[in-house]
Amino acid sequence: MKKALELHEFVKEVKRGNISIAEHTEKILEEAEKSNSKFHHFNLIAKKSALQHAKEIDAGIKTGQHKGKLLGVPITVKDCICVKNFESRAGSKILTGYLPLFDATAVAKAKAEGAIIIGKTAQDEFGFGTFSNNVGVDFEKPLNPIDPKRCCGGSSGGSAGFTALTSLAHASLGQSTGGSIASPASFCGVAGLTPTYGRVSRYGLIDYANSLDKIGSLGKTTADAALLLEVISGYDMNDSTSLKAEAQDLANANPSNDLRIGVVKEFFKACEEKVQKECMKAIDKLEEEGATVEEISLPLNAKYGIAAYYLASTTEASTNLARFCGMRYGLHGKLEGNFNEYFSKIRSQGFGTEAKRRILLGTFARMSGFRDAYYLKAMKVRTKLIKEFRQAFENLDVLVNPTMPLVAPTFSEINKLSPLQQYAMDLCTVPANLAGLPHASVKAGEHNKLPVGLMITADHLQEKKMVQAAKAAEGLK
Amino acid sequence: MSKEKGTMIGLECHVQLNTDSKLFCGCKTTAEEPNSACCPICLGHPGTKPVLNAKALDYAMKVALALDCEINQEFFFSRKTYFYPDMSKNFQITQYEIPVGEKGHIMLSNGKKVGITRVHLEEDPAALVHTEGMGSSNFCLVDYNRSGIPLVEIVTDPDMETPEEARDFLDQLTIILSYLKVFSPTTGTLKADCNVSVYGNNRVEVKNVSGKKGVEKALAFEVARQKHVLLEDKEIAMETRAFDEEKGTTRATRSKETEADYGYIFESDLTAFRLKKSEIDEMRNKLPELHGAKSKRFTEAFGLDEYTSKVLAGNFALGNLFEQVAKDTDANLAANFLTRELMAVVNRSELDIDSLELDSKEISSMLSLRSSGKITEKVAKDAIIVYLTKGVKPTKFIDGQGLAMDLNKGEIEKAVEKAMAENKAAVADLKRGKQKSLNFIVGQVMRLTRAKANPKEVQNIILKRIKGE
């Protein structure tokens, strides 16, 4: 695979007039179309509108009208993020035909900086998965470009898969609820950045779990992902949970070698040895280059993270998915019986197995008689887990651990896992997501050519430190 | 009263707040054409998020404060999830654990205190339209203009004992709402779920009854029905019933899941709201004088009887008008005239007193003419009818018709003299003590003066003449 230009280099060349955006866009669309029949990274390829947009920008550059940090950069968008007039299904059959009337704020911001949306990427239905194996009814699973027998990780599987696959300048908008950017970034060997909860507006994101969902970025390098994250960050009055925090210069953040790093003991111990080894090698090098490294313990997060996460997320998901019932938008059917029968019919047909499982789980956890024991308990536990992180950050800049406990598994390996075993794979990523902490996954090394991801977690709103540490880890040879 | 002892009534009132825009989006709250005031947010489109209308929250807090509630310094919204075609998201954003206010009360006109359990803010679902009637239609239409309109829910303790008390409660409540200017009685909706139990038996809920009259009627039927069931030695089923407005009866609906099964969770698309105690105090201090205080003040300041004060204060616009009119004329006359004559015209002609924009100076001038005897009561009544229904100002009306009794004494004397000379027989009868003749002669004088003399004055002059000269 030929090395693509980093985005900031690409944009510089575009502005100098050395790159035709129309040609570049055409090339990447061709690549997307050609690879998609095999790898299924796309739920939609927007050839016509992307080419049209590219031509407009080319024309604009000549007259000096078009500027922007992402001028002419082809961007893919996870299916659950709304793009105006692009069928946006969050990987679910039940949203067949849904054409949003608006752009998600993150998409609008990227467009405003000159990005070209070339398609919507494959994912676990509504984000319900760790391997992109839980795709919706009638959808194809995205395959890992390094080894198509293996998964891309998930749920932002298509985003990571195509980011790894393409030979051209490109970045992707992903979304994470419990680790859905970090997991596929790790399995595909790309950089994935998940911001602090509230840093990027969720307006236009088709909800999985509102208190956990974050839109983030994926790129071939941390610099690429950081540039896109910088563009989409910022307060948005359309999202009440959006933060009025000072913007940070992420694209130009220098790698930092003098960080105080905490190695999370419990998360390491839970990983396969080969994964531990690759990550430890990277950490040792960081220490050699000047970082202070110490082992720290997050016992509560290790013990209760998964349970609290799956209760909180499925409870919210079960209410978010209530609106899909064959009225107003999405999948429709023949009107028969009373409304209850009709809604049930559409929901039975439109949702996949894992979506149904999570609706049942989440509904159960908030039912009277169980609500206190499950939902409310999970909320209380969540507060305790955040406190544990807060203490850890009193003396540390970032925490590190393997992103995933294993390298990208094959689909036959995944099929042998029970749902609960699959959920347990999120052990390292879930805690930072529950706490709303910014975190990155970068490639630390390889085992048998399969990438191993290192996860770097920073304190709330410390995206810059996260990027600085990620760049340092990425630069190690 | 004693007959009704043992009846317990509690209400859950849903009142539409009269904000310009909806609770969670910028759509208008008024629209003619169905589905013309809606957007992706109130249609519940995937990807949209709610943003709270600060004005609606302000209104709900005013209501809670006016009902003497304790205001929670931190509160949040919840999702109440159930499937129904009028729900754009199949969950309603409402308040559950911690509402805006709790533990307030309202005074009924009989002096009884009705406890307010809680006051909270929530969104209205869409409207279902059964074009061919509820029973026969095999389809229904959904109008999302109503989806997301802000409602304040006021839940009472089961402190009312009769349907009349429930009606009075709603009267008192709507007066308070009109003082706060948060509810429009002409365009806004008021609905209530009515909970009734008799003699400590099972509680029955009559859902979604519209309007104050409806609530009173539904309760009257329901209390009678429950007592009848008991007389037949049967048990009262704990159930939800619907009110048939036309028939004035209630009927059992298909049993719905209990409240707890709504599976409430926090609405994490909205953040928690935190208020400082000082902010709450400031809002409380800014509340307008409410009708209880105003009516007391009227009695004390103007020497009005309690009943009249209550009637005046019971209508925000009327109370204001009275205060303005009373500045320039006799307060007692003004109070009586406004509560009786003016309100009679308002009610008869079904006018909206809030939108009348009456000139208080006109009314006070007219009343001053009346109190100095320059116009008759009939003229005053006619003048207010013409003013309210045709917009002709009273002073203009009186001038134009030459209705003021503004003849001077000499002119009246002349007319009396003439009348007495022309009706000698009547004068003679009067001298013999026949009172009827006095009225006759007065009438003759009024005819001669074309009613521009004060009859009382005319009478005095006649009597003087009979006695003396």
Image: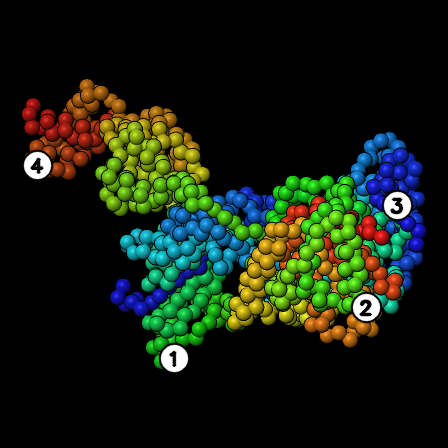
Secondary element type, mark 3 = loop
Q: In the image, what residue type sits under mark 2? A: Pro
Could you tell me residue B171's position as x and y percent?
37, 52
Q: Nearer the viewer, mark 1 or mark 4?
A: 1
Could you tell me residue B258's position as x and y percent?
50, 69
- Which of the two residues, B431 or B153, is positioned nearer the viewer here? B153
Instruction: Compute the Cα span from label 2 to label 3.
Output: 30 Å
Q: Residue at x 70, y 51 (%)?
A: A292
Crowding at dot 4, Cα within 10 Å, few <14 / some 14-19 / many 20+, comes out as few
Secondary element type, mark 4 = loop
Q: Is residue B400 above or below residue A189?
A: above
Callout 4: chain: B
Q: Nearer the viewer, mark 4 or mark 3?
A: 3
Q: Is residue B466 above or below residue B267?
A: above
Q: Is residue A147 left or right of residue A326?
A: right
- Occupied quadrant, residue A447: bottom right
Q: Mark 3 highlights which residue?
A: A5
Report whether mark 2 lies on the same chain as mark 3: yes
Secondary element type, mark 2 = loop
- Which of the two residues, B311 or A120, is positioned nearer the viewer here? A120
- Which of the two residues, A446 or B80, is positioned nearer the viewer here? A446
Q: Mark 4 highlights which residue?
A: B433
Q: Is residue A202 left or right of residue B244?
A: right
Could you tell me residue A298's position as x and y percent?
63, 61
| Sequence-earlier tag: 1 or 4 | 1
Cβ atoms under marks 4 and 3 closer than 8 Å:
no
* Residue A344 seen in render: yes
Q: Mark 1 highlights which residue?
A: B234
Q: Mark 2 highlights which residue?
A: A409
Callout 2: chain: A
Report whether mark 1 lies on the same chain as mark 4: yes
